[in-house]
Amino acid sequence: MKGIVFREFTDMVENHFGESMVDDIIATTNPASGGSYTTVGTYDHGELVAMVGVLSDRTGIAAAVLVHSFGKHLAGVFSRKFPAFFDDCPNTFEFLKKIDNHIHVEVKKLYPDAELPKFTYLQHSELEFELIYESQRDFSHLAHGLIEGCMEYFNEAFQIHREDVLGGGNTTVIFKLRRLVQ
Ligand code: HEM
């Protein structure tokens, strides 16, 4: 996984829990990389999962909740670092449609060794939309948080229901979005 993700994670941990928590989770997990993450480097995604596990032990907050919050945070980071992707889109559904065939394609050009999930979608109506996440890893809680972060960016509100598809080697999760009409 790219260092940009690690850096944003450790920055978030520092802002919420303090610098000593970052030092603690790195010292405790003792990552093979040494834990000095540069934005352009590439690291084993297991190091991030291990840090989340220790942070969860220390704080008593479930790992899934931590990763979800990180996803929301990351959506804000991406909107500031890569505003063009967001400016191009009028709303969340149109933005989510572009992850797989545009956004992550550009990410792959920028970082050829990026390990990206696959997204497909089904638009049922103006109100209902499904985003299907498939990955060899399980960052589905990150995806959930990212979707919510995008929803906030576009100032929209949805009920988001996740459905895990069991079986097969990959992680597959269907996110069902229903627009809340205000
Ligand atoms: C401007 C918007 C976006 C940018 C620049 C971006 C960029 C990236 C980057 C750099 C990675 C790391 C790849 C690696 O470490 O090898 C990544 C992974 C990922 N992205 Fe995106 N992304 C964006 C939007 C989204 C959105 C909206 C979602 C979900 C709704 C999403 C879901 C994910 C997930 C779940 C991963 C983790 C890898 C996995 O699950 O296999 N991304 N993305």
Image (cartoon, rainbow, N blue to C red):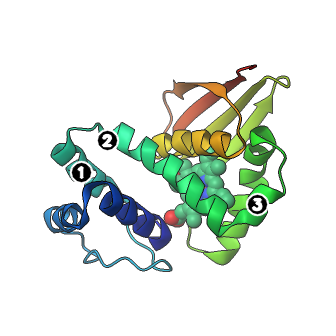
Q: In the picture provided, is 20 more to the left or to the right than 119?
A: left
Q: Work out whether mark 2 precedes mark 3 in sequence or the reverse, and give the earlier one.
A: 2
Give the number of the disc on residue 116: none
Q: Amino acid at mark 1?
A: Leu
Q: Secondary structure at mark 2?
A: helix
Q: Quadrant of residue 116?
A: bottom right
User: x and y percent of residue 1 in the render?
Assistant: 46, 65
The residue pinned by badge 3 equals 85
Give the number of the disc on residue 55: 1
Q: In the picture provided, is 110 more to the left or to the right than 89?
A: left
Q: Quadrant of ligand 1?
A: bottom right
User: Is residue 1 depicted above or below 95 in this figure?
Assistant: below
CB-based contact (under 8 Å), mark 1 and mark 2: yes
User: Is residue 84 depicted above or below 135 in this figure?
Assistant: below
Residue beneath the point at 61% across and 30% down: 174
Residue beneath the point at 37% across and 38% down: 64
Q: Secondary structure at mark 3?
A: helix
Q: Amino acid at mark 3?
A: Phe
User: x and y percent of residue 99 in the render?
Assistant: 71, 52
The residue pinned by badge 2 equals 63
Ligand 1 contact, mark 3 (Cβ < 8 Å) = yes
Instruction: Report the front residue among 113 and 68.
Output: 68
